[in-house]
Amino acid sequence: MKPLMLLAALLALPAAAETLVIQADQVLAEPGKAPRGPTSIVVENGRITALLDGRQAPAGARVLDLGSRFVLPGLIDSHVHLASDAGGTAAFVEALTESPGHAALRAQWNGMKTLHAGFTTVRNLGDRTGATLALRDAINAGWVKGPRIVDAGRAISVTSGHMDATLAIAELLHGSIPQDNLCNSPEQCREAVRRQIRRGVDVIKIATTGGVNSRIGAGLEQQMFEDEARAVMETARLHGKRVAVHAHGTGGVNLALAHGAASIEHGTMLDSRSLELFRKGGAFYVPTLSTVNGYRERLAADPNAYPPEVLEKVKWRIAITGKSLEQAVPAGVRIAFGTDAGVSKHGRNADEFELMVAHGMTPATAIAAATVNAAELLGLAGEIGALRPGMAADIIAVDGDPLADVRALKQVRFVMKGGEVIRAD
């Protein structure tokens, strides 16, 4: 082969993959089990290839020794809204004035806050514009950085329900506001699901009850009929999609569980039937306790942050939050971590851990909720949530032992997503 041809051939070869080894004194490779002692995690091509006892490394590997820091899998937040930051009246104004482009940039900004906080994967449960769908695709294409995103597109509800964007807006403006996510019969609900499928969503989100932040004084009990909810579930299953259900009141919770919801979001009022349905169907409970932090902080800054019809529900939610988790834990309900960030602050997702422990969980079970449990809920149990050979190299490290004090997870010092170091303090 001529020299120039040989040079061209060599240049055409892919660069040799770097072998990276993460070393630390304590590694929680399998949440729910005891941590390992000194361990070397071998990473190649963005995936874990081996976990070696002690400090050892293949020849030529680059070593990152994290010393006494505690290493665990990248965390998963099962309920966020990356395109949103505001609440109350401010959120109402934002929805009427913001461009889709601005929403997309905010979603990326919030995504990076979340990633730097150690949450390498999120499930985004609805936005108005499709900003987070676009961000998901941009991250997957390598155009921008951010967490791995499982996205629901626009969430579905009935007219006047929690996802009705025309609430409190003059009727003459309704025609300019997209409402193709609203449905009021089984046929319309099937079509609403298929519209989201057409957009390329990963999961379907619906509301079977009213919402705290809805600008309507219609309460928080069931607002979707059984035949409508069943139509949503059946259509989603037909297309291989799981359904996340916003539900506060017991009727809406039990309706969703009876027809195959993958998860109940908020679940603020549970009864014995709810607990039975959770256990029977294997659905996950995502309690989103952190919402109360967002409410308290906004009210402290401005007592008029929420209009009267919303403020009454906000006060109720603050008073009752955590009671259902206290029922669910001893009943053996499966718990997945989720914050509703957007109502609470992005980048402070780990505040949820402290609340989970305060309402009946242990640090170990709370960490499992944000790793192996959340990975199973998202359908990604073979990819994320633990540190095993073949899985994505999503790895974080903190100071201190989070199994002794879960607040250690608020101080993440190292973040790797898919083999790429994102943060190394």
Image (cartoon, rainbow, N blue to C red):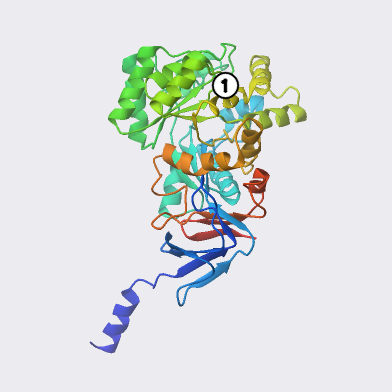
Q: What is the x, y in percent for residue 419?
A: 47, 60
The residue drawn where x is 64% and y is 14% is 309
Query: Of helix, strand and loop, which one carries label 1?
Result: loop
| 175 over 82 or under it: above or below | above
Quadrant where the N terminus is found in the figure: bottom left
Front residue of 402 and 180: 402
Quarter of the image holding residue 314? Answer: top right
**Along the line of sight, the residue nearer the viewer: 273 or 217:** 273
Residue 13, how many percent across, how many down?
A: 32, 74
How many marks can you see? Answer: 1
Query: Against 238, is 55 above or below?
Result: below
Q: Quick check: 112 left or right of 351?
A: left
**Quarter of the figure with residue 236:** top left
Residue 178 in the image: state x and y as whole percent: 45, 25
Position in image of residue 62 (x %, y %): 51, 72
Q: Residue at x 46, y 77 (%)?
A: 60
Say what amino acid the circle numbered 1 marks.
Thr
Residue beneath disc 1? 268
- Residue 229 visible? The answer is yes
- The front one of 165 and 115 is 115
